[in-house]
Amino acid sequence: MPVLTLMRHAPTLWNEQGRIQGRTDIPVSDFGQSTAEKWMLPVDIRAAIWFASPLQRTRQTASILGINPKTDDRLIEMSWGLWEGEKLHYLRDIHGEAMKKNESLGLDFCPPDGESPGGTEENRKYP
C-alpha cells in the first residue's frame, strides 16, 4: 500500500511573528533553519518521490532535509489576499462583526482578494 506523508515547511519569520503568510514567498528563518536541521526523516520515506509547493520556504526545508522535491503549482498555499502579512487579532479588531461573520463561514471563509479554504469559485469573493 502506498504511503502518503505530509510535511509542513520549517518556520519563517512571519510564522514566528504570528503573521498570515499564504502565498507571500517568505524564506525559512534562522530559527527555522536550526529547527529543521534537527528533524530526522524515517529511512523508509527518504527515498520516496517528493512534491512541494514552488515557494522558497518549502524548497529550503526540503534542501535542509536532503531531499529534492518536484515542485507543483497545485500545492501552493491558499491566497490570503489583502490580509497576507497581517496578524489575525489585528484583523478581528479592525473588522469586528464582519470578521466574525466571515470566520463563521468555516471553509467558505474568504479574505478580500484572497480565496476560501473550500476553494469553490462561488466562495472566492469577500462577503
Image (tube, grey):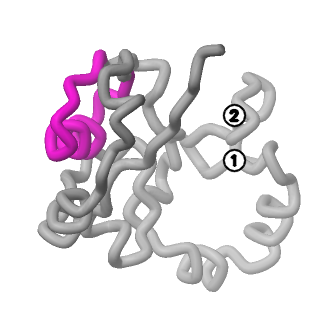
Decide: is 31 above or below 108: below
In-front residue for pair 33/94:
33
Name which residue lies at 48% across and 74% down.
87
What residue would you read off at disc 1? 110
Image quarter for residue 14? Answer: bottom left
Q: CA distance from mark 2 to mark 1?
A: 6 Å
Task: Answer left or right for 23 relative to 96.
Answer: left
Q: Secondary structure at mark 2?
A: loop
115 relative to 49 in the view: left or right: right
* Identity, as a three-letter code, of the amino acid under mark 2: Arg
Q: Is residue 58 above or below residue 21?
A: above
Mark 2 or 1, nearer chain start: 1
Query: What residue span does the magenta drawing correspond to?
Result: 51-70
Callout 1 environment at 10 Å: few (<14), some (14 to 19), or many (20+)? many
Where residue 106 sits: x, y (%)?
83, 53
The residue where tag 2 is placed is: 124
Residue at the (24%, 52%) spot, across then down = 26
Amino acid residing under circle 1: Cys
**Residue 111 against residue 97 in the figure, above or below:** above
Disc number for residue 83: none
Quadrant assignment, res 17: bottom left
| Residue 45 rendering spot, x and y as whole percentages | 40, 30
